Amino acid sequence: MAENLTSGENVPNNEVGIKQENPNPKISFITLGVKNLAIMTRFYRDVLGWQMEKEQEGVSFFKMNGGTVFALFSAEDLAKDIGLKSDQVAADNSFKKMSLALNFDSIIKVDTFFAFLKQKGVYIQKAPQTVFWGGYSGYFKDPEDNYWEVAYNPFL
């Protein structure tokens, strides 16, 4: 079945006879597992100024442009929800092998956002600069070392 998805062919009919195709889905929800929900919620809400959509016990939701929801959830609870065992969870200070990204439609907007981050005392990992792929980007990190790329991509 996996080879059908990678080859671009349609997946055979499922049990109820509905033809399934690769939907090329839009990412609609991103959940970040966090060690300290209160600190992380304050960072995204009060420091970055993101609008909270909803807060319920153990989870904070932020509505992003384009309809994507960004959620903060206890890392321990997220690992349990996924079904991970404790030996499968990375140490708190390890690189998570991923970054999240914010894309702007100009270099000026990237620089303006970095000036905002500096004003708020956010740690800048890499100042924005022209990068090898032809765009312009830099990185900052949140209080739990999650890295965010802030970029202008002239090809999108």
Image (cartoon, rainbow, N blue to C red):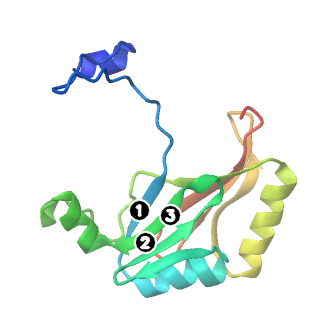
Disc 3: which residue = 70
Classed neighbour count for the residue bearing mark 3: other residues with Cα under 10 Å, few (<14), some (14–19), many (≥20): some
Disc sitting over residue 120 in the figure: none
Q: Considering only order in the chain, which callout, 2 or 1, is on the residue closer to the N terminus?
A: 1
Q: Which residue was labeled with disc 2?
A: 72
Whether residue 146 is visible = no
Q: Quadrant of residue 65?
A: bottom right
Do callouts 1 and 2 mark residues in contact (Cβ within 8 Å)? Answer: yes
Where residue 124 sits, quadrant-wise, is bottom right
Which amino acid, mark 3? Answer: Phe
Q: Quadrant of residue 17?
A: top left
Q: Amino acid at mark 2?
A: Leu
Q: Position of residue 113 (x, y in %)?
A: 77, 65
User: SS for tag 3?
Assistant: strand
In the displayed structure, 121 sits above or below 65; it is below
- CB of mark 3 within 8 Å of CB of mark 2? yes
Q: Outermost residue, right direction?
A: 108
Q: Quadrant of the C terminus?
A: top right
Relative height, residue 100 to residue 117 (above, below): above
Instruction: Kindly report the distance in space between the C-alpha atoms of the residues bearing marks 3 and 2.
Output: 7 Å
SS assignment at label 2: strand
Q: Quadrant of the N terminus?
A: top left
Judging from the image, what secondary structure is the residue with disc 1 in? strand
* Disc 3 from disc 1: Cα separation: 6 Å
In the image, what residue occupies the spot 68% across and 81% down?
Answer: 121
Marked residue nearer the N-terminal end (3 or 1): 1
x 63%, y 74%: residue: 51
Report the front residue among 125 and 31. 31
Vertical position of residue 64 compared to residue 13: above or below: below
Q: Which residue is mark 1?
A: 31
